Image (cartoon, helix red, strand yellow):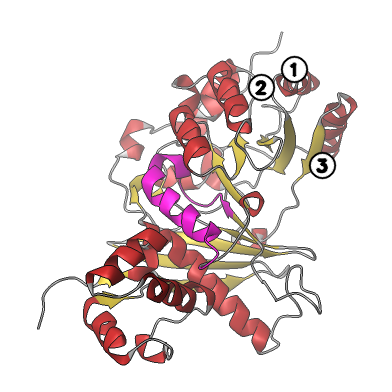
Amino acid sequence: MSSVEPVNLLGLGGPELRDLVAQWGGKPFRAKQLQRWMHQRGEDSFDHMTDLARDFRRQLGERCAIVAPRVATEQRSTDGTRKWLFDVGRDNAVETVFIPEDDRGTLCISSQAGCTVACPFCSTGYQGFNRNLTTAEIIGQLWHAKRVLEADLASARIPGAAGASASEPVRVISNVVMMGMGEPLLNYDQVLGALRLMLDDNAYGLSRRRVTVSTSGVVPMMDRLARDCPVALAVSLHAPNDALRDKLVPLNRKHPLSELLDACNRYLEHAPRDFITFEYIMLDGVNDSDEHAAELIAIAKRVRCKFNLIPFNPFPQSGLKRSPAARVRLFAQRLMDGGVVTTVRKTRGDDIAAACGQLAGDVKDRTRIDQRLPNRATIAIKEERE
């Protein structure tokens, strides 16, 4: 009996899989077949991969495995949103959310167990940080969700699929966003491997425009992503000036706004879309004044962008409040009057804590965040008014 840990094929990209197959004397097309069985058909049993040679299947069974993170819980919202809690070992769990809409199905994926950025409006940050997820753990969230949702569709438990028509194949998950737990660009290599699988025609075959990485502004990694795998980019802006952003997005102290905006313009030279999405959470009395809107309009003159205004989803530790709906509408109108494309994100899944900023999972913190930031809920982040 071999004591060697089986290779988890779920985290291997096309080139790595071809190299592995070649070690056993297999031809490249075998790797493609294997990829399609795993990622397109959701198969995890080598015995069921009937067009692979019997000896090859035996080798796979002896040396490899297809293992996604174990599902600890699944919840369903009244609005159709679904949330999975994935056990990633050693008392850590991460959350993944599927949001169905009439014209699309969006899966929100986590990249880290916890987060080191520690934004005061995000419940993930209050849990501290344990570790980066592997490519297999990241892509495993998509693998599991696709498998479950397509099985539901096949048994007619859900009414339809995003973008389906009589002449097109059904695709329940049409979009993937790296907006779950963690800062994706602080886990660059593993996230890059997952992104390449999402785009691979032998795996998930998503277009670059339908895969989005959200970052709080890790400038050096933004430049690397532009070169390595330019997908759609969303930047968690949340404040229009350095003084306020230093408090709301602590990473700003390392990469201030001017540096971040320059990186956005460099990214646009490679991006699949001709704009950057700026995410902006609406906090009552903190970042929602007419003056803040005017500052954002000035930013929009420096970077081709659209703004996605996000109603804050309160949680007890934050000490923050959601901007009233009337203030959000007026703020959005100010931006649009200034010539800026602006949308207001619809809150989905808040009854199961699956809405933006609510993902918390279960993290065994190793960064001593309670000792480093013991008074985060009482930190004054309101700007001084003249």
Q: What kind of residue is marked 3?
A: Ala
Q: What element does badge 1 sit on? A: helix
Depth check: give the residue in front, 309 or 64: 64
Q: Seen in the image, is 271 located left or right of residue 127? A: right
Q: What kind of residue is marked 1?
A: Ala
Pointer 1 with pointer 3, Cβ within 8 A:
no
Q: Choose the circle earlier in sequence order: 2 or 1.
A: 2
Which numbered tag is attached to residue 298?
1
The quadrant of the picture occupied by the C terminus is: top right
Which numbered tag is attached to residue 240?
2
The quadrant of the picture occupied by the N terminus is: bottom left
Q: Choose the circle earlier in sequence order: 2 or 3.
A: 2
Image coords of residue 385 (percent x, y): 70, 13
Residue at image point 45% right, 40% down: 185
Q: Which residues are magenta?
A: 177-202
Callout 3 crowding tier (Cα within 10 Å): few <14, some 14–19, many ≥20: few
What separation in Å lies between label 2 and label 1 (alpha carbons)? 9 Å
**Is 184 colored magenta in this rendering?**
yes
In this rendering, is residue 219 above or below 54?
Answer: above
Pointer 2 with pointer 1, Cβ within 8 A:
yes
Q: Choose the circle earlier in sequence order: 1 or 3.
A: 1
Image coords of residue 84 (percent x, y): 51, 68
Q: Seen in the image, is 170 located left or right of residue 188? A: right
